[in-house]
Each structure stands twice: as C-alpha cells, then as structure tokens.
Amino acid sequence: MLVIRVLASAGARGVPLSGLADVTRLAPSTVHRLLTKLIRERVVRQVADSRCYALGPVVYELGLAAARQFDMRAICRPAVERLAHEAGDTVYVVIRSGDEAVCIDRQEGPSPIRVLTLQPGSRRPLGLGAGGLAILAHLPDDERASVLAVVTPIIVRQYQFPARALRDSLEVARREGVALIRNRVTAGVTAIGMPFRDTLGHCLGAVSMAGINARMTQARVDAIKPLLATAVREIERSIARRVD
C-alpha cells in the first residue's frame, strides 16, 4: 500500500524504482519484487518511454466501484461550485486518508489568473497544504500529535519546510479556525483552508482556495473566510442529510 500511495502522488509520469526505494525506505530488491507482483495484477504499469512505474488500470476500476459508495465529491460539489463562482479563484476539496490529504475535486473560478497547484487524485502529507493543515489542526490532541510525528520528517525531508514553521502554522490554524499558507508549496501562491466534519464531529476533509499573492491580500483573505465558512456549513448539512 505504501508503494501504491507513492505512485498515486506521482500521477501519470510515474516514479523510477530508485525513487520508490528512497521514498518508501525499502530495499530496491524489495521494491522490485513488490512491483513485479503488482504489475502481474495490473495494479501497477511500467511507462514505456521512461521505464518509470505508475498506477495500473485495476486501480481505476476499483476507484469507480468505490465512488458509488463513498461519493464525497458529489456531496461537496454544489457548495464548491458556488464558492468558486462567488470568490473567483480556484477551490479544492481534500479528504483525509490516514496521514495524508487527498484532493478529490477542483473547481476553477472566473479569475483570469488561475492557480492550479493540485490535481484531483494527488496526495500530500497532512499539514503541508492549506487543506491538509486545516484538517490536522482540528484533529483531537492525541491523534494530531501522532500524525505530526509521522508527517514532520516527510515534510522536512521532501519539501524542505522547517519543523518549527510547521508547528507554528499549526498553532495559528488551531487558534483561528482557518489555515493560511503563503509560498509554502508553490512560490508566489497563498492558500486558505477550512475543515468540515461529519455528524459525530469527526474531521473528514477541508475546502481550500488558492490564488497568487498579489491577489490574496489580507483584506481579500478576510473577505474569503465567511465564504469558506458558508461552503463548509453547506457541505456538513449535505453530509447530515445523507446520514438521515
């Protein structure tokens, strides 16, 4: 599953065997053995031109089957479309998957300068992007500490983001109820995120919006916060209706 998660983050370009070994911290011989078996089951494929490894067709087929049971995208879509139209910038929906945030939807607003930093299906450690930071900030204390211990070394090593800065931004997000990042993932880009919960109060995911720094002034961020809050409430009401 670790190999599959890494490949899901890479997208169609794939990852070389050496890259998989580095990220998973498994021996190259072990990774090769796993890949051989996964290719046999069509879960993984080898990209012809680069000889890198990418997800195979069976993953797509399984995703179609799962979507009929766990269609959070459909639940969130009306609120997300409205938010993108009202605010003008690109809106993302991410959901929690273990220690990662997975992008399940993206809606582009009418702004002529669009920021497309996430593709649907891409994964990042919780705490890195605005959505993942919002989710991590609103987990129970013991669970947040456990996740933070896992993701901090990954974020420091792979994204060169200091551990202290991660903790500081997490505390700000907890205090203010909204996560704000500038130039963290993409230079020149600001993003703001807010979490949504199920009927039991568990944090399921987050809605975030991203724009260029020049556009995302403090005044504009302040104006976006209530729009995000409205979208979150609409999503939570939709989740409650599905449960009922």
Image: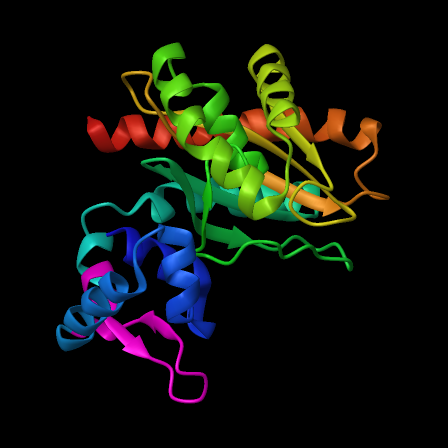
Magenta region, residue range: 42-63
The quadrant holding residue 118 is bottom right
Q: Residue at x 83, y 34 (%)?
A: 217
- Looking at the image, residue 72 sits to the left or right of residue 217; the answer is left
Q: Residue at x 35, y 73 (%)?
A: 53
The quadrant holding residue 16 is bottom left
Is 141 rendered above or below residue 222? above
Is 198 rendered above or below residue 94? above
Total count of labels: 0
Across and down, in percent, residue 169 comes to 63, 23
Q: Is residue 58 magenta?
A: yes
Across and down, in percent, residue 200 comes to 27, 16
- Looking at the image, residue 160 sits to the left or right of residue 54; the answer is right
Q: Is residue 94 magenta?
A: no
Q: Residue at x 31, y 24 (%)?
A: 198
Viewer-side residue, 94 vs 53: 53
Any part of residue 121 in sight: no
Across and down, in percent, residue 49 comes to 44, 89
- Looking at the image, residue 65 sits to the left or right of residue 98; the answer is left
- Colour mapping used in the image: rainbow
Across and down, in percent, residue 236 comes to 39, 27
In which quadrant is the C terminus drawn? Answer: top left
Any part of residue 193 in sight: yes
Q: Residue at x 56, y 24 (%)?
A: 229
Viewer-side residue, 243 vs 19: 19
Viewer-side residue, 36 vs 55: 36
Single out the residue that lies furthest toward the right: 214
Viewer-side residue, 61 vs 159: 159
